[in-house]
């Protein structure tokens, strides 16, 4: 209890200072793993990339708006749900894809492309959510260009720096890629975990009213990715990858937007509850994903 109380006292520092710097480190790590070939990989498996991008960039926002309309939560939760949905994938989805034997190159390619595109879509969709769900006297000011600049500094600049380092010192970057990726991932889990613990009072108080909405979005988005990939008859490894890319959101980015850019903790309720439940559903699908991949590979082997 004393530890929880101490973390609660540090909630502002963790969410407004530590998490944005953690996001920069995550994006730097993503950049170190990227080359221009990752963007060109769209030509290698165009169908999988198009399906993943459409599901992330169109399917996720539409899902969030529809669920917010259907469940009718308070305005701050509705806007927060949209913000969570428009921050797709990230390093966490890469880790789950790797653990479930999914298509890691496809995962990296989707993460790279969405990291570029969402810098421009997030401010516009956030503004739309504020206008749809909040009255003029309720909504915080949102200078779109200022938000765009902040997102560039938080995401694209670290990614570009990582890619420059990879291009300048390819051998060193390649050797450091996997150990650094693991270190960043563990640190990310630690920081997000501390963020959740420090806000535990908010989560416990709001779970009864918001929990079902967030769980529904989590399961529906994972189902959306899985269903689309199956519908278009993608290989099992790509099915697993798109499920995680669509169903696992970039929590570090969502926290950075709500706590640091918009400076409104009330908008972070959906993301905080999502952070508490998503690892359980993702880990369950890791087991399912491994079975799907193993079943397809065993059926394709000559008898």
Image (cartoon, grey):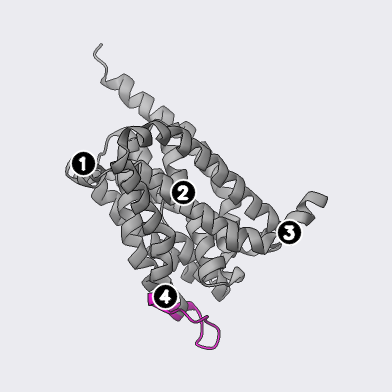
Residues at marks 2 and 1 touching, judged by CB atoms closer than 8 Å: no
Eye-nearest disc, 2 or 3: 2
Q: Is residue 196 above or below residue 286?
A: below
Residue on which disc 3 sits: 8
Element on which disc 1 rests: loop
User: In the drawing, does residue 75 fall left or right of residue 98?
Assistant: right
Q: Are marks 4 and 2 in contact (CB under 8 Å)?
A: no
Report helix, strand or loop for mark 3. Answer: helix
The residue that mark 2 highlights is: 26
Relative depth, front residue between 260 and 217: 260
Q: In this picture, which residue range is highlighted in magenta?
A: 131-145
Q: Nearer the viewer, mark 2 or mark 1?
A: 2
Q: Which residue lies most toward the left here?
A: 43
The answer to whether residue 142 is left or right of residue 302 is right
State the residue position of label 4. Answer: 146
Marks 4/2: CA distance? 22 Å
Q: Mark 1 highlights which residue?
A: 45
Q: Position of residue 59 (x, y in %)?
A: 35, 59
In the displayed image of the protein, which residue is found farthest to the front?
168
Magenta segment, principal secondary structure?
A: loop
- The answer to whether residue 208 shows anywhere in this view is no
Label 2's element? helix
């Amino acid at each position: 209890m004393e530890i929880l109380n101490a973390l609660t006292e540090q909630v502002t520092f963790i969410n407004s200072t530590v998490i944005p710097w953690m996001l920069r480190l995550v994006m730097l790590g993503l950049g170190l793993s990227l080359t221009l070939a990752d963007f060109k990989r769209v030509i290698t498996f165009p169908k999988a990339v198009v399906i993943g991008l459409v599901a992330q960039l169109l399917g996720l926002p539409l899902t969030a708006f529809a669920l917010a309309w259907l469940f009718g939560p308070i305005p701050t939760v509705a806007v927060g749900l949209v913000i969570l949905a428009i921050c797709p994938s990230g390093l966490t989805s890469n880790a789950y894809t790797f653990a479930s034997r999914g298509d890691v190159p496809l995962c990296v390619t989707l993460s790279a492309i969405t990291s570029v595109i969402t810098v421009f879509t997030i401010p516009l969709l956030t503004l739309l959510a504020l206008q749809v769900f909040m009255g003029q006297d309720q909504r915080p000011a949102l200078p779109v260009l200022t938000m765009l600049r902040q997102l560039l500094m938080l995401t694209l600049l670290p990614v570009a720096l990582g890619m420059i380092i990879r291009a300048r010192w390819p051998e060193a970057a390649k050797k450091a890629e996997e150990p650094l990726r693991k270190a960043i991932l563990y640190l990310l889990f630690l920081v997000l975990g501390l963020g959740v613990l420090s806000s535990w009072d908010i989560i416990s108080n709001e779970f009864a009213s918001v929990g079902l909405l967030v769980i529904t979005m989590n399961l529906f988005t994972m189902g959306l990715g899985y269903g689309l990939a199956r519908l278009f008859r993608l290989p099992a490894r790509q099915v697993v990858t798109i499920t995680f890319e669509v169903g696992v959101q970039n929590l570090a980015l969502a926290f950075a937007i709500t706590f640091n850019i918009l400076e409104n903790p009330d908008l972070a309720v959906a993301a905080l509850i999502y952070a508490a439940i998503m690892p359980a559903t993702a880990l369950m699908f890791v087991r399912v994903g491994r079975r799907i991949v193993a079943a397809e590979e065993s059926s394709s082997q000559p008898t």
